[in-house]
Amino acid sequence: MTELELCAAAISAMKNAYVPYSGYRVGAALLTKSGRVYTGCNIENASFTPTVCAERTAVFKAVSEGERDFAMLAVCGGKNGVITGAFPPCGVCRQVLAEFCPPDFPVLLITGEGAYRRVTLAELLPFGFGPSYMEEKVTD
Ligand code: THU
């Protein structure tokens, strides 16, 4: 799985976005260290707050299938699915990534067809709060 192939999977995932309110289609593709890819799209809701982002859809799909070791994430988005530049993960998604991914975890911000900017989770979430700050973890 190349970085460009992961980007292609994220772009493809935008087609399933359910976005009747914003029109912004977002797609994510999460590569596990075992070589599997979990895709996600944003799913909006008439009550707004239950809306879930593409990145969290991908992470939660993977974790719910027993995968917690991640290698890379690609994400893209744009009005009506047209990518005009990076569509970076929101703060909540950055926090969810920090639960499972190390500071040097690579995130590919897709900027166009075959083009992306590679950043790390630490760049997206500096001095982030993560599991290491929890002295007593109840479960693994
Ligand atoms: N959205 C994502 O899917 N991921 C992000 O990290 C940023 C925002 C979605 C939520 C909503 O459906 C739309 O983009 C506009 O905010």
Image: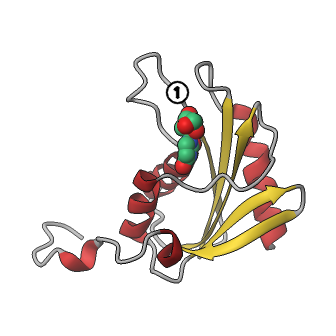
Can residue 42 be seen here? The reply is no
**Could you say which quadrant of the image residue 101 lies in?**
bottom left
Question: 72 or 95, which is in the foreground?
Answer: 95
Vertical order, 64 against 67 (above or below) = above
Q: In terms of secondary structure, where does tag 1 sit? A: loop
Is residue 16 positioned above or below 109 on the image?
A: above
**Mark 1 residue crowding within 10 angstroms, few (<14) / some (14–19) / many (20+):** many
Q: Position of residue 135 (x, y in %)?
A: 12, 78
| Badge 1 residue CB within 8 Å of ligand 1 | yes
Q: Is residue 62 left or right of residue 77?
A: left
Is 99 on the left or on the right of 34, as rendered? left
Question: Residue 119, percent across and down?
Answer: 63, 74
The x and y percentages for residue 116 are 78, 66
Locate residue 93, reporting x and y percent.
46, 54
In this view, 36 is above or below 8:
below
Image quarter of the C terminus: bottom left
> Horizontally, is 124 left or right of 96 in the view?
right
> Can residue 15 be seen by looking at this rendering?
yes
Q: Residue at x 51, y 69 (%)?
A: 124
Q: Residue furthest top?
A: 46
Instruction: Give, as a three-letter code, the residue at label 1.
Output: Glu
Which quadrant does ligand 1 occupy?
A: top right
Task: Please give the residue where the numbered disc 1 appears in the rendered image.
Answer: 44
